[in-house]
Amino acid sequence: MAGFAASFLKSSVAVGILVFAVMGAVVECASEVESTIAPSISPFQSRKSIAVEGVIFCKSCKYPRIDTFFGATPLVGAGAKLVCNNTKRAVTALGKTDKNGYFFIPTDKVSSFGIHKCRVFLDSSPSAKCKEPTNMNGGVKGSLLFFRKVLYMGTKTVFLFNTLPLAFAPSNTTACVH
């Protein structure tokens, strides 16, 4: 029995040394491979200018007390305001919607590092019948921004963020008479 235990111990030690040697070679090879691969640089590691996009609608009269975009129409000329509170003074930038209710607000005043302190608010409505700002998706309290993609505008790199759709509502029930 003692002979069996001794031979088992010797073979176990030999296997352990072999495994250790193989593991050492693998680690050594891996470190050589890592040193030959260039480190990748994420675009988020450097400060970039930002731009914000979104859409503003006028809610339908059919659903006055329900937060829905059913029947809503794009609001031409509506104002959106980007507000960033990451400095001593709040930084603001304004944008107007086109015929599709789409707005685009580019700004160099805020970098990608400060975007987490930015919100988009409903600013103004050109329509007398649809002037009441709603808090749908944060239109009154401030809508969150979501990263969309990187834009390459000439030599400039801009991070594009978007917001969920925002809406104004008809000012009063007389604007909704059928």
Image (cartoon, grey):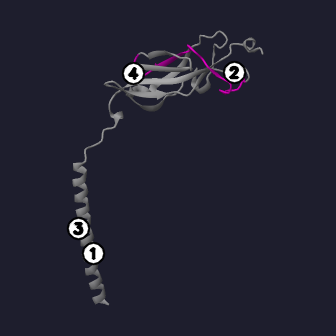
Question: Is 67 covered by the magenta stretch?
Answer: yes
Q: Nearer the viewer, mark 1 or mark 4?
A: 4
Q: Which residue is at a point 70% across and 26% down the rendered structure image?
A: 66
Name the disc covering residue 110, or none: 4
The local secondary structure at tag 3 comes to helix
- Give the camera-side residue of 152 and 141: 152
* Nearest to viewer (mark 3 / mark 2): 2
Helix, strand or loop under label 2: loop
Q: Which residue corresponds to the image point at 66% horizontal and 21% vertical from the top-left? A: 59
Q: Name the residue under label 2.
A: 60
Residue beneath label 3, please? 21
Outermost residue, right direction? 178
What is the three-letter code of the residue carrying label 1? Answer: Val
Judge the density around disc 4: few (<14), some (14-19), many (≥20) Cα neighbours within 10 Å. many
Mark 4–mark 3 distance (CA, rounded to whole Å): 54 Å
Question: In the rendered image, which quarter is residue 100 located in?
Answer: top right
Neighbour class for label 1 at 10 Å: few (<14), some, many (≥20)?
A: few
Q: Which of marks 1 and 4 is nearer the N terminus?
A: 1
Query: Vertical placement of 46 versus 91: above or below?
Result: below
